[in-house]
Amino acid sequence: MRSCLCVALCALLVGCDTPPTGPIPDAAPSAPPPTPATGEAMEAAPAAAPPDLDASLLARLLNCGDATKPGLCSILSRFGSCSEWNPIVPSGDGRWLGRGYVVEKATVREQPVVLRARRVGTSEVGKGQLGVRLALATLTKEDGAAFEQADRVIRILERHDTPPRGSSIMEYVRTRSAWSEVNAMRASAKRVYALTTYGTYLCQSSQQSVLVVQRDTPKGMSPDGLYAEVWATSW
């Protein structure tokens, strides 16, 4: 009886050490280790330069037969020969005042325009953008004395004379604090492109004024937008 128990015990022990029959399933494949990101891969790609302004097309749409006549047609004619404009001024907060022409559904109305260029750190803008934020605004009758004096002071600036100190419009431009700023980049070697909804182009004329064309529609057969020539009041 004792010998039978020993034989049975040995059989149990041998059975525990016997490997299971049949194929052993493969282990689940492990994901390859991630490739370390290089400095170049971690940086965001610079934004592509926007297309340059087709001033000749806009001039045709606006029936600009006489490019020498003052107004929006003169602004468009000079865009082809404008020079590079640097929006970053020594003070870091440049301001301009001038005459604007708002085109909307084949109608044109004249309005005073103010422009601001505020210097910012490159960490505050996207890759490939300029270290500046731009803002463009029009004046209306609600702006009171500033609006009423604007035309007279703009004519003084157009003659390259010095406006009188203490005028309401000059004080308005100097102290205005509510601006809708946007980032900017180069559209070409000469023109600055402000990232408004449909794009705003700026360059410098031979008279040292800044020429502005702000589109109000996507690229196409509509010339709607704001056309302006502004003069520096502080830099």
Image (cartoon, rainbow, N blue to C red):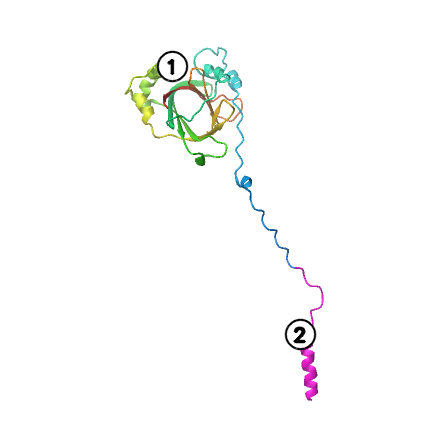
123 up-or-down from 97: above or below = below
The residue pinned by badge 2 equals 16
The residue pinned by badge 1 equals 158
Question: Magenta region: which residues?
Answer: 1-26
Instruction: Identify the image quadrant of the N terminus.
Output: bottom right
Q: Quadrant of residue 71?
A: top left
Q: Along the line of sight, which residue is nearer the eye, 166 or 92?
A: 92
Which label's residue is closer to the chain start, 2 or 1? Answer: 2
The answer to whether mark 2 and mark 1 are in CB contact below 8 A is no
Query: Which disc is residue 195 wearing?
Result: none
In the rendered image, the residue lying farthest to the right is: 22
Q: Is residue 165 left or right of residue 81?
A: left
Q: Secondary structure at mark 2?
A: helix
Q: Please tell me which residue is depicted at 43% across the width and 30% down the height of the picture.
A: 132
Q: Can residue 198 be seen?
A: no
x and y, in percent, of residue 105 in the image? 47, 21
Type of amino acid under label 2:
Cys
x and y, in percent, of residue 170 in the image? 32, 21
Q: Can residue 122 be seen?
A: yes
109 up-or-down from 88: above or below = above
x and y, in percent, of residue 161 in the image? 34, 14
Q: Is residue 127 left or right of residue 10?
A: left
96 up-or-down from 128: above or below = above
Type of amino acid under label 1:
Glu
Q: Residues within 10 Å of mark 2 (few under 14, many from 20)?
A: few
Q: Please tell me which residue is depicted at 68% across the width and 84% down the height of the picture.
A: 6
